[in-house]
Image (cartoon, grey):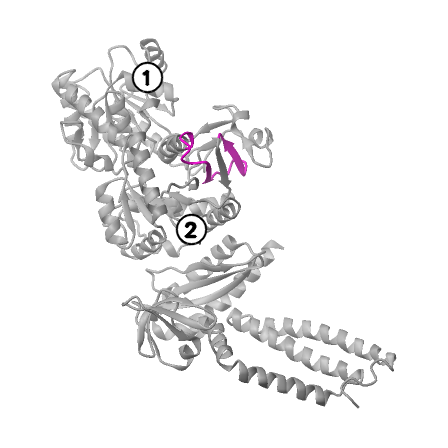
Amino acid sequence: MGIVGPIVSDATALVPAGVIALVTVLLAWVSGLVVGRLLSRTNPRMAGAGRRLAVGVVVLIGGTLALQAIGVNPAVLLVVIGLLGAAILIGLREPLGNYGAKYFSDIYTPFKVGDTIRVQGYAGKVIEINAMTTVLLTDDDLLVSVPNASMIRDVVVNTSPQAWKEVIVPVTLAASVDLPAFESELLKSLTKLRTRLDRRFPPVLTTKSRSAQSADLALTLMLRRPEDRDAMTAEANKRIAEVLDRVRGARR
Amino acid sequence: MSPSSICINTQTPLVQFLDPGAAATANGTRDGVDLSSLREGIDYRFSPGGVTRMVYPLVRRLLERGVLTEVHWVALNPRAPPVARAGAITLHNVRLDAGRLAGYGEMKEALWSRIHDLEPERPHDDLFWSEAFSEYAFYNRRTAELIRQLDAAHDFDAFYVHDFQQLPVGQMLETLKPKVFRWHIPFDLDPIPPPWRSVLAGYLDSYDAVVVSAAAYARSLAALAPTRKVIRLYPYVDPAEYSRPGPAAVEAACERFGLATGDDVALLVGRMDPVKGQDLAISALSTIAAEYPRLRLVLVGNGSFSGSGSGLGLSKSAAWRARLEEMVRALGLTERVVFTGHVSQSDLDCLYERARFTLLPSVREGFGLVAVESWLHGKPAIITRRAGIAELVHDRENALLFDPSEPGSLAEQMRRLMDDGAGELVARLVRHGRSTSRKCSLAAAERAERAMLEELMEA
């Protein structure tokens, strides 16, 4: 039997395939919702990635079953998908690595645009973090482009004053969310953590980019003690999620 | 290159609506209520004094000369329609509900008091962690969002943000276009609590240039935010607006305010606020009242926009006036002190004309444009050393200076003017005062502001 065998010859096979497809769509939606809810207290970007992964897995399984129902050999299909995936990974290994590093850089790399860092023997001010590289401006006015993957793999030293204090939490807001109300409620909520934060630097919410659908923001908190970094990030994310729920609820 | 379209942001609106209902229904179009269809003094009035009185003539002048072609003015105005038009200027009004307004008012009053070095015993260290700060942030973010939306529609060349209430707008307004901030109140580092300094520096750092009213403030500000461009520009008035009323108009106005022919009038123009030092003037009057039985103190002014009924309703002026009236009664000066409240521009001109001299006795004053008004009316002025304008004053040359912390010094200077009559000292003060006023004229400001904006646009 070939990959595309008796699809047309037996039209009745389309009915179960259609049912499987419908159930798959429903399950994908539910699983995205459940995983999103389960991860709602973590970093929003992590929650988004988890949600998309859950949806992807359900779609892959459901799609395979649906194709099987119309007579497509799933083993052959999976081999083709696997080979294609491997080819893509091998061919785009470097850029994908850099892109992945950039994707999670907000969470795992302790620097931002404007900071002064040392990496791979280079030192300079970070003037750009794009999809592939981090661009440094050195004291000699030279531009140095460092692949993002190096920022995860190599030792990076942030030499900016008080850099250890800084915790930057990315926040993505749908355009429908009232930004002033969200910020005001978040500031109120964060005052509860003030004993763990440097009083000279109250929380600051800055806008990084906007689109018609959403706004990417960054919440900057300044720690009083370096060992609070992880706990503060988790607590800030929890409070962001709570405030978002409240602000959305108030709007409804 | 000059900016041709600009967005101005102030807390105090150019226009206060006295009857918001009428304003909303009268000729309200998609582009807003046109002020020309309303009645000044009945439906609306221009905000008296302060920032708007200074900025409006300059904007009008720049529009007349074709330097500016489009001006949008965003301000806090809870009792106004969302959009109104004043000639070529489009007014956008930010509205807050009463709860948020109260929190915002609490925060800005605390900021204002501390920066003016008032209430030093009140702890302020945690102000930026308070609930009031979250409302202050709400107002500023709402303003910044409105400005951003307007910019998307009109593509402004530059943004000009005025006064400490609006300070966070620069940080909240993400744009690569020039942003200028004008700091109108005093700026000394000493009274600012250390925990505030990094916050203020962060806000100031978000602007391309910061304008202050005195060289001393520029030095303090440069020490706080050394990376910012700091410019000293004197506040200004339009001399053309200061006319000399005829004797009949002056007599009629004086009669309305209970002033008799032969009274020696010491005039103090300023809103009812402890920082304006009306109590110092009353004390000084009580010291010399017996020596000069015809000397009368006239206090002109009411609450600010924040304190007025058509404004924010955050009044402290009524309480201060009640305290002053009690003080006057206790000192037995009821017949010697006149409280006029808010007066029209023509009545104010008459009172200046009638004055023997004027007082600026503020405990702290960002600049003190009323002294310039006094000079334009040809009246000698006694000026506190704690006003920005004091750096333009040479004692006994263009005005008399006094230190509000030295008891008796204001009374001493009042005595000096009373004893001189229309003598050599008064003539010198008037002559040199008028000459100094040119540094604070609209023409001087137009040159300086244009040069600053052009430099920023070129940069």
Q: Circle 2 sits in a helix, a strand or a loop, which is it? A: helix
Q: Amino acid at mark 2?
A: Ala
Is residue B264 visible to us here? yes
Q: Residues within 10 Å of mark 2 (few under 14, many from 20)?
A: many
Rendered image: mark on residue B132: 2
Q: Chain of mark 2?
A: B
Q: Is residue A117 above or below residue B147?
A: below
Residue A51 percent coordinates (x, y)? 60, 73
Q: Secondary structure at mark 1?
A: helix
**Chain for numbered disc 1:** B
Residue found 24% across the figure and 11% down from its top: B262
Of discs 2 and 1, which sits in the foreground?
1
Q: State the residue at coordinates (24%, 37%).
A: B388
Residue beneath the point at 37% across and 14% down: B256
Q: Quadrant of the C terminus of chain A?
A: bottom right
| Location of residue B255 in the rendering, given as x and y in whole percent from the top left corner | 34, 12
Q: Which residues are magenta?
A: B63-87
In terms of depth relative to the viewer, which is nearer, A121 or B336?
Answer: A121
Q: Is residue B404 visible?
A: no
Report the amino acid beneath label 1.
Cys
Asked where in the image residue A128 lies, by quadrant, the reply is: bottom left
Choose the circle earlier in sequence order: 2 or 1. Answer: 2
Which of the image's four quarters has the N terminus of chain A?
Answer: bottom right
Q: Which residue is mark 1?
A: B350
Residue B78 x, y percent position in the rendering:
50, 39
Q: Nearer the viewer, residue B293 or A66?
A: A66
